[in-house]
Amino acid sequence: VGIAALAPGTADAAAKKLTAANWDASEQRLVVSDAVMGEAGQAGFAGASRLSAQAESSALTAIAEREGTTSIAIPALQAGTPITLVRFDALLVDQLGLGDVAEHVQQVAAAAGLVPPSYFGSEVVARYLSLRYNHPAGEDRLELYPRDPITRSEAAHSFAVALGFEPWTLSAARETLSGFSLPPYSSAQRAALRIAVSKIGMPYVWGGTTDNTADGLEHGGYDCSGFAWRVYKLSGLPAGKSILGRTAAQQAGEIPKSSRIPPASVQPGDLLFFGSARLDSTATEASVIHEGIALSAQWAIHSSDQGVYVLPLSSGWLAESFSWARRVL
């Protein structure tokens, strides 16, 4: 029912139980050795602790210098004020020189009537850059909600990702996301997509269907089909009555082949299915392994390794693995 990221490929993960303090030990060592972050006194790195304003400012300065964006003013961060995950992402996106791209994405979503949360644009950019990490099944307790204070461990992971960018990474992200656009929506499309957009930045949780633990899991969040289930079924939208199955394969397979929609005919609000299956294939749990919702014929919102985020349908894994779409509106 979704795609989960792999655990950090280090011996630390296998040697001991992962905690909020140690799950990314290799990334912690990297940011310390590269003078982006420092130890937290006698406590060592103190990965489970909240990131302080001072540590954030120092790290942003170091990252900006490495990326050649030192002309961007670093905002004053008030000591003692928690830095939330989405605030952290916005600050890092800005220091990477993509703040204007984030603002473009935000304005496009707002102009389309989707009432995006204030951090929609920066989260789209941050997660396109893979700045976040999906804690695998069994470690979901380590996930953060968008407005949770970010920990030093989570910050270290993001900084380590930024340190590993290829020379073309940021320019490619700018080129792709500057092309973000949305069409006029019908009232039904707008109602469904407002719900979808409101979940931006929620974590990927295997089997998850809610913002909290009401579904019996240890942390709120969504897997891919659980995200679609939340938007159309749990919301009570009339269109959800036609959706019966819970998994991506079930939802893909409960329509006749004659009703399957190819990429060129995708419309906003369509359910999108991905895997090895093609238009005339039988939908199985092995051949349809991922699901999203169309924001347009060119863009999808889905829950995957970066949580709930946005990707283009015209390139990358979504384009290469597109099976078919299903019209529910």
Image: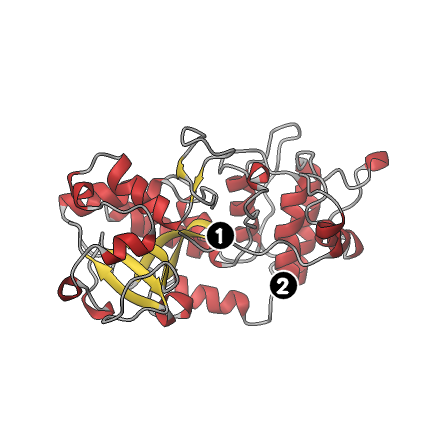
The spot of residue 291 in percent (x, y) is 34, 55
Reading the image, the residue beneath label 1 is: 306
Q: Which of 126 and 18 is in front in this view?
A: 18
Q: In this view, does 166 lie above or below 221?
A: below
Which residue is at 42% across, 40% downward? 208
Q: Left or right: where does residue 313 sit relative to residue 101? A: left
Q: Distance between the residues labelled 2 and 1?
A: 26 Å
Q: Which of 270 and 47 is in front in this view?
A: 270
Q: Which mark is residue 68?
A: 2
Q: In which quadrant of the rendered view does residue 310 lie?
A: bottom left
Q: How crowded is mark 1: few (under 14 residues within 10 Å), some or many (20 or more)?
A: many
Which residue is at 21% across, 46% downward? 243
Q: What amino acid is found at the position of numbered circle 2 in the picture? A: Gly
Q: Which mark is residue 19?
A: none
Which residue is at 62% across, 62% downward? 67
* In this rendering, the label closer to the viewer, 2 or 1: 1
Q: Left or right: where does residue 82 sit relative to residue 185? A: right
Q: In which quadrant of the rendered view does residue 51 lie?
A: top right
The spot of residue 32 in percent (x, y) is 78, 51
Q: In this view, does 76 lie above or below 300?
A: above
Q: How crowded is mark 2: few (under 14 residues within 10 Å), some or many (20 or more)?
A: few
Q: Are marks 2 and 1 in contact (CB under 8 Å)?
A: no
For residue 297, say whether it is visible.
no
For residue 298, say whether it is visible.
yes
Labels 2 and 1: the sequence-earlier one: 2
Q: What amino acid is found at the position of numbered circle 1 in the picture? A: Gln
Q: Is residue 289 above or below residue 43?
A: below
The spot of residue 98 in percent (x, y) is 49, 57
